[in-house]
Image: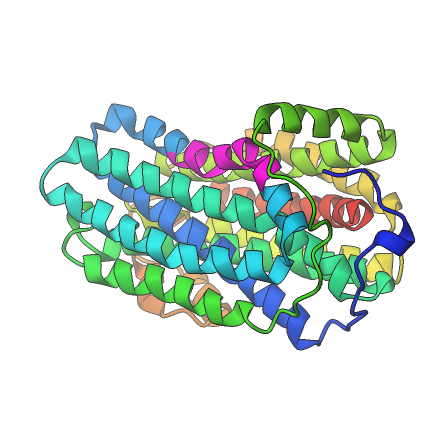
Amino acid sequence: MEAVRSDSESPATTGGSLLSPGFLGLLATQFLTAANDNIFRWLVIGIGKQHVPESQHASILTAGTVCLVLPYLLLAAPAGYLADKYPKRSVIVGCKLAEIFIMLIGVAAILCGQMTSGWAVILMMATVALLGAQTALFSPARAGSIPESLKPELISKANGLFTLFTVIATVIGMVIGNWLVDATGPKGLDGWWLSAIVLIGVAALSVFTSLPIKSLPPGNPSRHFPWDAPQQTWRDLKLLGSNLPLFRVALGIAFFYAIGGLAQLNIDQLAAEGGAINASAKSPLLLALIAGVCTGSVLAGIWSRDHVELGILPLGAFGVALNSLLLFTVPQRLFQEGNPVPWRMLVALLITAPYEFFQTIPPVTLGFLWASVLLFLLGVSAGLFNVPLEAYLQ
């Protein structure tokens, strides 16, 4: 993080619209990045659980999340350096090319399960960490491209769209990843080629969507590589702390992503303890959460109009707290034995998914429906909370 530059030192901006090829390419690239991160992470978590005893399933779930998130902390300084030193488009395209090779390594790690379970799990988790590192290096360039590519009055709407598409991609990635666990057989070995097509295909597609992003001059081409990365991160935090409004906004954004990560982990555990018989059973709960965040993000963009509206924050924060507490009222048993129930056909029609997919989900209880309602409201509140913060920070 550099000291704030004067207007005369700021890079030229394009002042484009939300329909410009550069912004649409950036939005599509972010969508595919978030989708592939979660496809691979949940695929690895599902396969990893098959390599270890049931008592260690929670450890696999935690390890998969930690391996994806930890690089964001370790690579904060180098990621900021790349986004400042080089044109942001070059950084984005480079990261997407690297993602293809990382996915090749991931497929090889899955195939290692034919020989040894221990090394297969280690290699899969290492690949998740590599994928997290790629995304960590990509993120500052992506975030910095938004204000450089758009008119200032469009930044709130743009952040609403990015939050919307990122959350959609996150849950779609979870659904596809869990579906691949069920579709590729024991330890993912029978249909490994299907995983390869999906993972490498999404990575390759993200390379093409990144090409229309307009290349602008680098923000600080004279910046030196932070060889003292831990110390640089500490100095950046001190600099951030010296600006109290920005520091509070950064804490709020960190809180949003912490709640999001916790929600993902708990939905998986909630479904498992509620009687889920396969990885796909948690998908309707994830769909409820995504529908809520989508709704909240759109509402935040509409209510903000052409400025940053921080007045939405208290409403979003209250909703996050209230619905998180109410989730404690959800009964333990969410699924029951029996024939399929009619609501599945309605959901299948709404998301144009094949009805056969929902046949794999056991019948639900009223507790399941109550959990879905609370997750939807939690998502709405989270969207209202995050969008103004992201816009203010940029």
The image quadrant that residue 217 belongs to is bottom right
Which residue is nearer to you in this view: 8 or 175?
A: 8
Magenta run includes residue 362:
no
Q: Position of residue 9 (x, y in %)?
A: 85, 53
Farthest residue in the front direction?
Answer: 222
Q: Position of residue 256 (x, y in %)?
A: 66, 38
Q: Is residue 70 magenta?
A: yes
Left or right? Give the position of 355 relative to 159: left
Q: Residue at x 72, y 38 (%)?
A: 1
Q: Is residue 16 above or below residue 92?
A: below
- Nearest the viewer among 148 and 284 is 148
Residue 365 visible within the image: no
Which image quadrant is residue 155 in?
bottom right
Say which residue appears at 55% left-offset and 71% top-offset: 211
Q: Seen from this angle, which residue lies furthest left?
A: 115
Tell me if residue 237 comes above or below residue 270 in the rendering. above
* Total labels drawn: 0
Residue 100, quarter of the rendered image: bottom left
Residue at position x 60%, y 34% in the image: 226
Position in image of residue 173 (x %, y %): 44, 55
The colour scheme is rainbow
Image coords of residue 172 (percent x, y): 46, 58
Q: Nearer the viewer, residue 393 or 285?
A: 393
Q: Which residues are magenta?
A: 64-78
Up/down of 195 relative to 349, above or below: above
Majority SS type along the magenta span: helix
Q: Nearer the viewer, residue 157 or 373?
A: 157
